[in-house]
Amino acid sequence: MSFFNASKKSEDVNQGGSSYITKSGIWPVTILAPVVNVSKGGSQSVDLYVEHQGQKQIVYGNLRLTNNDGSSNKIGAKIFNQLVIIAGLEDVADPIDAELPIGKGGKMEDCSVLEDLADIDVLMRTQMEYSAYNGSIQEKKVIKAFFRADDNATAEEIVNETAPGKGFEREQKYVDNVTYKDDLTEEQVNEWIAAKRPSGTADSGGSGGGSKGGSSEAPSFTKRRFGKGKGE
């Protein structure tokens, strides 16, 4: 008589959950295309169209490079700079006109893409942030850090040529952090998630949808279609 009989059924061997990034953690992703956007106020940000475990999704609006007045946004610019260093680049060329399947139902949308940072494997730390606006809960994935995929190196370790991995280890204490704003409680947010994020609530860090356009001053190049992933 056996103690346990192994099952090879799909439902019993899969990792469980969705491949969409919906919680705080450090995730191995391929950056398929960084999308440049300019807000109505004039601030410039970079959204990341990424692939995680075969699931393509977009992380919106928290790599803000400039403020409305054109000054540098120190937090967003610093994290973006870390990504550039980890990618092994000295600079990043102006965005090109492109199309991405980020519209409703995967519809192709026009956008401005930083081609130099396309198709790059990294480890990306995200922290979930919940806030309230007009009585609705808003959810956002805030990018906190990047690490080189093959050895967990930080940008600082790469620049200083020190042993990789120490910064990654220090980051582990923050991996499960979640931010609750506007007097929201963990219980309220968990109930909202369990109810499948009821309609009428804003999911500003969603995995679908799209943010059209970008900088109106983007160079006019032949449009390229991104998002097919490596080897496709």
Image (cartoon, rainbow, N blue to C red):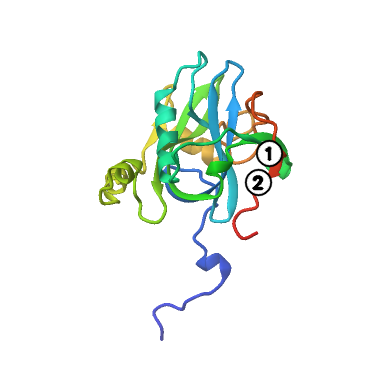
- Can I make out residue 196 in this image? no
CA gap between label 1 and label 2 equals 7 Å
Depth check: give the residue in front, 41 or 130.
Answer: 41
Q: Which residue is mark 1?
A: 98
State the quadrant of the C terminus: bottom right
- x 39%, y 79%: residue: 3
The quarter of the picture where residue 77 lies is top left
Mark 1 vs 2: CB contact within 8 A: yes
Residue 140, labelled with which disc?
none
State the quadrant of the N terminus: bottom left
Q: Is residue 10 left or right of residue 75?
A: right
On screen, 175 above or below 151? above
On screen, 5 above or below 74? below
Q: Position of residue 193 (x, y in %)?
A: 52, 39
Q: Tag 1: residue type? A: Ala
In the image as oriented, which residue stretches furthest toward the top?
A: 69
Q: Is residue 124 left or right of residue 8?
A: left
Q: Which badge, 1 or 2, comes first in the chain's sequence?
A: 1
Q: Which residue is mark 2?
A: 226
- Can I make out residue 37 in this image? yes
